[in-house]
Amino acid sequence: MAVNPIEVRLAHLEGAYEQINHRLGAIEGRLESIDSRMESRFAAIDARLERLEDKLLSREDKLLSRMDRQFFWVLTLVVLSILVPISLRVLNL
């Protein structure tokens, strides 16, 4: 029985397509693995950033409170430095 050259070529192409399908399936599996690892790492980074943000916000609140107190004292000193000379002039009359 003679084998038709077209059948040989078709069999060769079918084998090549099966190899390509197998390789693409392996690549797809690897990409899914990489995707899941990236998602978990991004989630870890997000959690770290949220903790850092909370820490920075608490520091910011502390700094704002301290600045408020210092502003109060500076304003008090400025007002006193204005009122004391005025009151001394009024009392000396």
Image: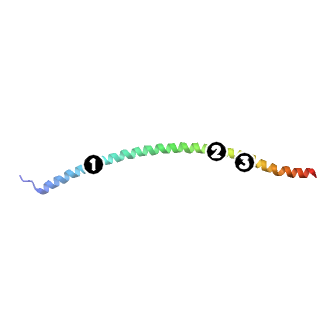
Secondary structure state at the residue bearing disc 1? helix
Specify the amino acid type for callout 1.
Answer: Arg
Identify the disc placed on residue 23.
1
Few, some or many residues within 10 Å of mark 3 (<14, 14–19, 20+): few
Specify the amino acid type for callout 2.
Answer: Asp
Q: Disc 3 versus disc 1: distance between alpha carbons?
A: 70 Å
Residue 64 position in % (x across, y down): 66, 46
Q: How many numbered callouts?
A: 3
Residue 74 position in % (x across, y down): 75, 48
Compared across the picture, whether 5 is left or right of 61 comes to left
Compared across the picture, whether 54 is left or right of 33 comes to right
Specify the amino acid type for callout 3.
Answer: Phe
Viewer-side residue, 66 vs 29 = 66
Q: Earlier in the sequence, mark 2 or mark 3?
A: 2
Residue lying farthest right? Answer: 93
Residue lying farthest left? Answer: 1
Compared across the picture, whether 36 is left or right of 91 comes to left
Q: Nearer the viewer, mark 2 or mark 3?
A: 3
Quadrant in the rendering for residue 59: top right
**Which residue appears at 86% of the width and 52% of the height?**
86
Q: Which of marks 3 and 1 is nearer the N terminus?
A: 1
Q: Earlier in the sequence, mark 1 or mark 2?
A: 1
Viewer-side residue, 73 vs 42 = 73
Residue that badge 2 annotates: 61
Label 3 close to label 1 by CB (< 8 Å): no
Secondary structure state at the residue bearing disc 3? helix
Identify the disc placed on residue 71.
3
